[in-house]
Image: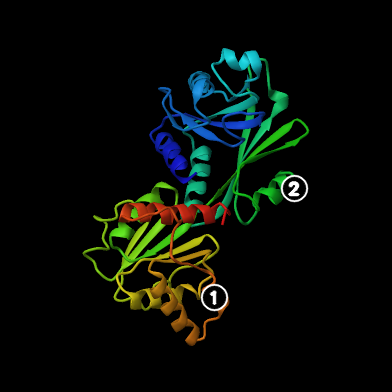
Amino acid sequence: MKQFLEAVLKELRQGHPVVWASILESSGSTPRSSGARMMVRTDGSIVGTIGGGIVEAECQKEGVRALERGTSCIREYDLTNDAAAGLGMICGGRLSVLLDVLLPEGSVLAQCEELLQGLERGGRLMRVTRVNKTSLGESGDVAIRHLVINKSASHADLLPLEVISRGVRTRDPFTVQEGETLFLVEPAASRGMLYIIGAGHVSYFTAKVASMTGFSTVVMDDRDEFANRERFPDVHEVRVLDDFSDCFGRDEMGEDSYIVIVTRGHQADREVLAQALRTPAGYIGMIGSKKKREATYASLLQDGFAQADIDRVYSPIGLSIGADTPEEIAVSIVGELIAVRAGKV
């Protein structure tokens, strides 16, 4: 969501209207599920995807027409049997797509900026699009209202209870029907704050892959020749430490916090791991051999940590894919982070 919002805001701030295209409803074997989104610019170019193929191409064209009219609309696609073959599709099912025209005006900009700022702060918000189906005419044009729901539950009284109750439990977009009104709910939560301690070769590639997959990444090291913006241009923050004695003192950790320990020495790894175990981070991983891991664990147990603390640690770090080079190790580490984020491990 964050990169998508940045792209939308870039166009709006330059005075260009855009279409926020979202799959409202789908049934059968359609390319993407409800909530998949893409942006259509006035020249027909896009950011994001609603599944590719002929339907996406049709939505690009319809998006440009909607921008020319200045009116949002809903388009229905029947992908079953002969209809699917006619569109060049091999999957079956039905697809409903909302082409939501966003104009470069104050309220639209303010809502998009509120969402982006909330994500950057690690907050949890919801973008709710209220579609009044009674306004749906033969042209498919439809009346739209947008709401941004933050943790204070502002505007919650304007929405069905299911919108709020489901919205606080899931990261996945969903729809709620109430009478002739359809609510498209797009939770906007941080995709994870990743703290990489150590700025060597493995860290370098891990930060690159993590940033590509949506993690807000902080890199820390006590060597400024390694921990600097020139080396890590894409991360959220780079910190040069005096030493590793207080890595997380200024950070608010939670279940969506991830810690990867890849310092250059066993003693530093042990020191950082002890600090990490005192946080509620949802993931703590440490690189190293089995021998190093066992020695570190034994030392921590002697210092009063419990076995339950040790059991939180992912070590050896990363998925078992036969990784050997720093690049491959980075892929295995981020693969494990993604699996934890998705609740698969």
- Looking at the rendered structure, the kind of residue marked 1 is Asp
Measured along the vertical axis of the image, is residue 145 above or below residue 61? below
Measured along the vertical axis of the image, is residue 7 above or below residue 226? above
State the separation of the CA atoms marked 2 and 1.
Answer: 38 Å
Which residue shows up at 35% across the image and 52% down it?
328
Counting from the top left corner in percent of width and height, residue 127 is at 59, 43
| Residue 213 in sight from this viewpoint | yes
Foreground residue among 92 and 70: 92
Give residue 237's quadrant in the image: bottom left
Q: Which residue is mark 2?
A: 161
Mark drawn on residue 182: none
Q: Which residue is mark 1?
A: 309
What SS does tag 2 mark?
Answer: helix
Counting from the top left corner in percent of width and height, residue 231 is at 25, 56
Q: Residue furthest right?
A: 179
Measured along the vertical axis of the image, is residue 342 above or below residue 130? below
Which residue shows up at 70% across the image and 45% down it?
163
Which residue shows up at 39% across the image and 51% down it?
331
Specify few, some or many for label 1: CA neighbours under 10 Å numbering under 14, 14-19, or 20 or more. Answer: some
Counting from the top left corner in percent of width and height, residue 278 is at 50, 76
Mark 2 or mark 1, earlier in chain: 2
